[in-house]
Structures are given as structure tokens and as C-alpha cells.
Image (tube, rainbow, N blue to C red):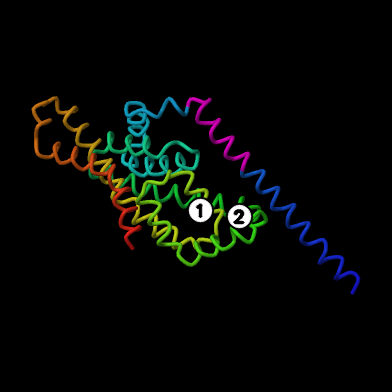
Amino acid sequence: MGLRMEKAIQQPGASKKRAAIKASIFVAFIIGAVALVRYTPIKDYLTPEAMGRFLDTAGIWASLVFMLVYAVGVSLFIPGTLLTGLGAAIFGPYRGFFYVWVGAMLGASSAFWIGRTLGRDFATSLIGDKLKKYDDAIERNGFATVLYLRLIYFPFTPMNFGMGLTKVRFWDYLFGTGIGIIVGTFVFTFFIGTLKEVWASGDWGQLVSGKVFFSVVLFIFSFFIPKIIKKIKKEK
């Protein structure tokens, strides 16, 4: 009996210690990721020209390599808008959209897994009674919550890691993300990709074409999407 009681007392302390160790690794990973991108030659590849040359070396695997680069980049806190712009500029509006979307989904999943594996236990130990009800709510309404936050353009990478710290189910997170980023991803890639095609062709008369006009309208409209979504939510 005494031994069992001693183990029961030790287990919470051991669990907290493990959680603190994993949280320390999580913080170290974030700091290391930011430093890696900022202070190493990686940042030199974050231009259409440099990335294009790098992908040329991959030959027929260029699209797959880009999607993996996008996924790793998101996990290293490289801004998603920058990576999306690179995809659109290199592959055009349509293929760029598909490759960016797949890369974003891979990156969102990996960042979520890192947050859940390294940070969830520590986050749980910090959650009090007031925060627990919100944590429970996001478990019950995970898909709707993730979808809403994606539609209002909540910062992509912080949300990926942050959701891993909550009780949201992975599949709710995955489907909410997959659907929620479609519109924004398409609008941005279509806009950048269309302008790149005009620039590459050298035919500046295409700037007044219907396709360019449509891309500009979509791009401007995208800035109003968060306000529209919030207004609809309030009305409900």
C-alpha cells in the first residue's frame, strides 16, 4: 500500500517534469527555426529566381520538391504568403494553386503534430477552470472553429502550432484547414500567377485583359472576406 501511494505521489511530479522538458524542446525548436531562416543562406533561396533555379535541379520532381519545401518552410516559420507567392510565380495560377494547397496542408499537419507532441502536456498543466471550458468547446466544435479562423485569415503558421496545444481533434483541424484555406490560396495564387504570366510574355497589353481584371477584383475582394464572415457570424 505504501509503495503504491508513493508511486501515485511521484507520477504527477514526473508528468509535470516531462511536460516541462518537452515544452523546453518546443521553445528551443521555435527559436532555432527562426534563427535558421534568418541567419543562414536559406533566406537567399526565398525569391522566384533562386527558388526556380533550385527546382530546375529537381527536374520532373520539381513540383514534389516544392510542396515539401513549402511544408518544411511553414514548420520553420517562413511566412505562408511568401511561400504562396513563390509557388504562384514559378508554376502559374493553376498548378501553383494546387501545389501551394498541398504544401500548405502538409506543413499545417506537421506543425500541428509538433505542437501537439511537444507542447500539449505543458499547456494542459497551465489550463485553469476558466480556460478549460474553452478547451472543451474547441474539442466539441473543432471543425467549425478551425474553418472560421482560416476564413478570417488568422495568421497561418502560429495557428498551426497553436491548435496543436488545444484539444481539437486532428481530423477536425485537417478538414477545417483544407476547406478554409482554399479561397484565400486560390485568390492569391491566381493574382500573382496571372501577373507573372503577363510579365513573362512581355505583352503588357494583357494588363487590360479580362483575366487580369478578374484577378485584381478577386484580390481586392479577398480583403473583405474576413469582415463578411465576421458579420455573418454575428447575425447568427
Q: Which of the pair 68/58 is nearer the observer? A: 68
Residue position marked by numbered label 1 in the rendering: 163
167 lies left or right of 190: right
Q: Secondary structure at mark 1?
A: helix
Q: Which of the pair 183/149 is nearer the observer? A: 149
| Above or below, 150 relative to 189 | below
CA gap between label 2 and label 1 equals 9 Å
Q: Quadrant of the C terminus?
A: bottom left
Q: Which residues are magenta?
A: 27-41
| Above or below, 40 relative to 147 | above
57 lies left or right of 213: right
Q: Residue at x 44, y 47 (%)?
A: 107
**Residues at discs 2 and 1 in contact (Cβ within 8 Å):** no
Q: Residue at x 48, y 38 (%)?
A: 77
Magenta region, mostly helix, strand or loop? helix
Q: Amino acid at mark 1?
A: Met
161 lies left or right of 17: left
Q: Residue at x 42, y 62 (%)?
A: 143
Residue 60 spot, x, y in % from top left: 31, 41
Residue 89 spot, x, y in % from top left: 27, 34
| Above or below, 94 relative to 82 | below
Residue 174 spot, x, y in % from top left: 42, 58
7 lies left or right of 135: right
Residue 132 spot, x, y in % from top left: 59, 61
Q: Quadrant of residue 127?
A: bottom right
Mark carried by residue 120: 2
Q: Amino acid at mark 2?
A: Arg
Q: Quadrant of the N terminus?
A: bottom right
